[in-house]
Each structure stands twice: as C-alpha cells, then as structure tokens.
Image (spheres, helix red, strand yellow):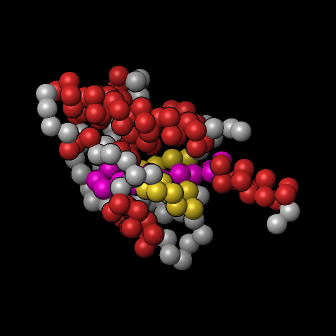
Amino acid sequence: MAESEEGVDKARLKQPASVLFVCAMNAIRSPMAEYLTRHHFGDRIYVESAGVQAGVRDSFAEAVMAEAGMPLGAHTPSTLDDLSDSYFDLIVTLSPEAHHRALEMTRSQAVDIEYWPTFDPSSVAGNREQVMAAYRQLRDTLDKRIRARFADD
C-alpha cells in the first residue's frame, strides 16, 4: 500500500461518519458515550447507542451527565434489535457481552469494531457520593477516550 493511500485509510478510520456505542443494557456506558460524542462531534459524526439487552434508565448516569451540561433527556434504553439502521462505520463495544454480540451481528458486514473495556459503575457499593464518584470517573474516562479517538489530526 502506498504511503499516501495509507494516510487516507488512517484518516478514514480516525474520522467515521457514523458510530454505534454498545454495552450490556444501554443504561449507563453506551448512552454516556453517545451523548459525549454528540456533544463534541455532533455536527460531524452521526451517533447512536444500544444494548445487548434493554435496561432501565439510570438516575446516577443522568445526574453526572447533567452535571457536565449533557443531560440524557429522553434517552430510553434500547437494544440492538431496536435500531432502525444497523449499518455504522464504526461500532465501539464497551462490555464483553456487547463485543461478542457485535462480532456475531456483523460477520458479513464491512464494519470496524473497537472494544473499549469499560468499568460498570453500577457495581460500586457505598454512599451516594462514592457511587457518584464512580459514575463521574466513567464519564471522564469516556470523555477523554472519545476526544482522543475522534479528534482531528
């Protein structure tokens, strides 16, 4: 592959036009990633999120996103089966079960899949502030990773 072609391919991979974030239940990790991406790159990247299973809205996720000025609004957890369009340039999986499902689902599609192992803050026990700290850490970690992954070179 010629050097200039390789540069174009890297730019294409670095700048997908559409991204799907997938986690276990589309209640915490994937909606946070969706809203962070939309906030930073909404005019450039079409973004959605889904879960392997449908979960329920998570009040801690809503609270930490609202703190950052990105309220989850009317987000309703949905599954991969609920998607109206199943073609994306990039699928980012945030949990092992989501990664396995995305690989199965896209076996015959030309789509890039990236696995970002991501901590599930709902497993944290403690008082409200300890739990909120775990959710903030997830939000901030996703924010840094999203900015680095989709930033213009």
Please state which of residues 127 and 18 is positioned toward the viewer in this rendering. 127
Tell which of 67 and 122 is nearer to you. 122
In the figure, 39 relative to 111: above or below? above
Left or right, 97 with reference to 131 = right
Q: Is residue 101 shown above or below 120? A: below
Residue 132 lies in quadrant: top left
Q: Is residue 138 magenta?
A: no
Image x and y of residue 6, in percent: 78, 58
Residue with the most extreme bottom position: 108
Q: Residue at x 42, y 32 (%)?
A: 140
Tell me where residue 134 sits by quadrant.
Answer: top left
Count of number-bearing discs:
0
Q: Which residues are magenta?
A: 15-27
Residue 11 placement (x, y as % from top left): 72, 50
Relative to residue 63, is residue 99 depicted above or below? below
Instruction: Please report the residue visible at 20 percent of the width from the left and 44 percent of the height from the top.
Output: 123
Q: Residue at x 71, y 39 (%)?
A: 153
Whether residue 24 is in magenta: the answer is yes
The foreground one among 3 and 31 is 3
User: What's the residue at 30%, 56% (across, down)?
Assistant: 24
Image position, residue 2 (x, y; %): 86, 62
The answer to whether residue 6 shows anywhere in this view is yes
